[in-house]
Image (cartoon, grey):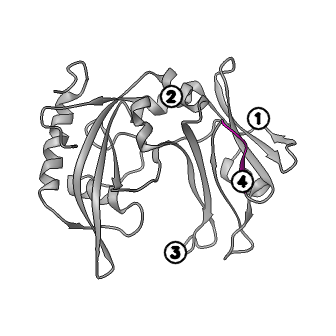
Amino acid sequence: MYNRGCFGINNILKLNKEFMRIKNMGWVRTVVNGSAGVGLTFEYLLGKEFDNEGLPDYEGIEIKARRCYTKSLINLFNGNPNSKEKVAQYLVNNYGYLDYIYKSCNVLSAEVDTLEKRKAGKNYKFILKVFRKGRRVGLWIYDSDDNIMDGTTVYWTFDYLKEKLETKLKLLAVVVASRKFVDGIEYFHYVTIRYYQLKKFETFISLIEKGIISICIKISVYRRGDKIGMIDDKGISFRIKYEDLDKLFTRIKIEKDTYR
């Protein structure tokens, strides 16, 4: 049975009905190539137009779609640091490395947590630090000899993170799809769904401290279109492993739970 204390249960039941309709369609062709296809195709089948407003996807419920057996982390939300700097430009200019195709452009890719300094590019190390008294999470940057380079420019206040989290993720649905390729084109069969309710914000901060929630920095270069050769800033995303979702959320089970 569903959790009767959960708000928005009618919307969950409405989404579940839509999920069963999509599941019964069987195999459907992706609407876009690449890693985003599994999520965008599901949203298309829901009748939802693509947007990037930072709001839940469907009737107050954030939807995360993923392929079966993938080991990729779940992006909870993108969070722009509170610093006044243009962060992408600042990071790639000071700590990035040359793109392997556009050798006049710097790029930067790093997965960062609080457990240890993680290598970023050739010469730097990044780590997250939680400052409870200052109520912020900061990105600290070191050189290869462990000399501190920056610990003040890139940070997120607790108030900002709380607003992002509670605006987007009070309710979460995780959809899992089987996949196959026909003549080089990807097809999905959406087979299972799980529903979750967000725990307290303190839990989120505690999981960052434990290294269970990390951030992903991905700043690359556009390789086609009108912006070719320009910075492609995909933002800084807060991420968690699929198997750790129960640490941040409470599972909601409904009468006909569609996840075995």
What is the CA distance from the residue labelled 4 to the residue labelled 2? 25 Å
Q: Which amino acid type corresponds to the residue marked 4 in the rendered image?
A: Ala
Magenta span: 115-120
Q: Quadrant of residue 205?
A: top right
Q: Name the secondary structure under disc 2.
A: helix
Q: In the rendered structure, does residue 252 fall within the stretch colored magenta?
A: no
In the drawing, what numbered circle is on residue 225? 3
* Neighbours of disc 3 within 10 Å: few (<14), some (14-19), many (20+): few
- Determine whether, in the image, residue 238 is placed left or right of residue 195: right
Rendered residue at 73%/43% (across/down): 117
Residue at mark 1: 152
Residue at mark 4: 120
Percent position of residue 214, x then y: 57, 41
Q: Which amino acid type corresponds to the residue marked 3 in the rendered image?
A: Gly
Say whether disc 2 or disc 1 marks the residue closer to the N-terminus: 1
Query: In this view of the protein, which residue sits in the foreground, 83 or 174?
Result: 174
Percent position of residue 132, x then y: 65, 20
* Neighbours of disc 1 within 10 Å: few (<14), some (14-19), many (20+): few
User: Is 253 drawn above or below residue 30 in the view shown?
Assistant: above
Q: Which amino acid type corresponds to the residue marked 1 in the rendered image?
A: Thr
Say whether disc 1 or disc 3 marks the residue closer to the N-terminus: 1
